[in-house]
Every structure is written in structure tokens, then in C-alpha cells.
Amino acid sequence: MSKKESTFLGMLLSLLIITVISGFSLGFVNDLTLAPKAKAKLEKKVNALKLVLPTFDNNPVADMKLAKAETVADSIEIYPAYLKNEFVGAAVIGTTDKGFSGLVKLMIGFKPSGEIENIAVLEQKETPGLGTKMTEAKFLQQFKGINISTYKLKVKKDGGDVDALTGATISTRAFCDATQMAYDAFIKNNGSLIGLKN
């Protein structure tokens, strides 16, 4: 019995079949996980809204408004909050790619006066033990109740008022960038938010 020699055409055909089967399998698994991923993402956003906004009785996700920004290509998401049809604040998503490891995405809650209610870190890939400390209450506490119009939103090293994370000045600068972007969008759109439910 003679041994069958493999040919280039046979190997190419085998590779093509394996690639097609793998592609369909990956596509099928991706389709199966799309709904759970979207649900988890929405749940994370709703939890962040509850954390950063004052008490509200509307559905900020349904009332979400997209605003254009000069600094980024994408629109900025603004989630207005109302209590008994009165505007009580808004959550704004601020992003920057200037973090030490890239994207930093925050949700900042503002009172109608422009003061920060609270901040939630939605995404970051900073250095563990250094930049990741931006998610800790100790760091976030310094921003609660401040109004950026009278606060220098820069690290102290750059002449600002923000205490930088030890060993993570770049991450802190990115955090300030994203917060400033959110504040600018809030101030620019504040008037239209007040009138949405009236």
C-alpha cells in the first residue's frame, strides 16, 4: 500500500475548510453573547446613574440626549435626572484616550448649579495598584461638591487643585481631562435639559 502524498492543493483546501468552520463558529458564539453583553453594559450604566445622580424618578436612559463636542469625534451622552418633573441634575459621560494605558471613561453627575454630585469610573486600563486607584473613594472624594468654574481641574504639579495619584500623574491628568470634557458638555447643554420635562 503506497502512502498518499500531501499536495499543496490538499493542504490549502484543508486550511480553507478549517477557517470557514472556525469563522462560522466564532460568529455563532458572538451572536449568542450579544444580548447578555448589552444587558450587562446597560445594567452597569444604570447602576452608575444611581450612584452619581441625586434622587430622581424619571428614566434617564430613556431621556438620554446626545451632544456634539469639539474635542472628540463621537457624541457625548447626557442623562438628565428629574424629580417630580423638576430638573435635579445630569450625568455626563466623559472620555479621553490620554490615560497611561489608553481609554479612561467616566460618568460624572452634576447638580443643576454645576457642582459635582459624584463620579463613577466606567472603563480604565491603567496600571494595577497605581492608575487603577482612580476608582477608589479616597481619590474620588476630592471631586464631590466642587464646581469646576471655580476649581482648577489640573494636578497640583501642573498648577491645579487636584491631588494626583501617587506614581500615576498621567492617569490623574486623563481623569481630569475626561471630567473637564463632561463639565463643558453639561454647561453647554444645561439650559435645554432644564426645559425637557416642563
Image (cartoon, rainbow, N blue to C red):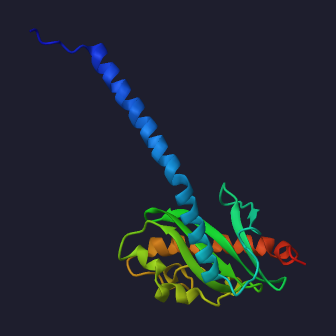
Pick the quarter of the image with the N terminus. top left
Considering depth in this image, is 116 or 156 the residue closer to the camera?
116
Place of residue 86 in the rendered image (x, y in percent of width and height, measured from the top left): 84, 84
- For image coordinates 64% across by 77% down, the residue present is 49
Asked if residue 152 shows in the view, the reply is: no
Judging depth in this view, the residue of 29 and 75 nearest the camera is: 29
Which part of the image, by quadrant, shows the C terminus? Answer: bottom right
Q: Which residue is drawn at 66% across and 80% down?
A: 109
Image height of 54 relative to 43, above or below: below
Residue at the extreme top: 2
| Location of residue 107 (image quadrant) | bottom right
Give percent across and percent down for residue 68. Answer: 74, 60
Left or right: residue 106 versus residue 129 is right
Give the residue at x 63% y 81%. Answer: 50
Q: Residue at x 55, y 89 (%)?
A: 142
Which residue is farthest left? 1
Q: In this view, does 163 lie above or below 106?
A: below
Q: In which quarter of the image is residue 63?
A: bottom right
Q: Where is residue 36 in the image (x, y as percent from the top left)?
A: 53, 59
Residue 85 is situated, as x and y percent measured from the top left of the image, at: 85, 82
Q: Where is 53 relative to 38, above or below?
A: below
- In the displayed image of the protein, which residue is found farthest to the right? 198
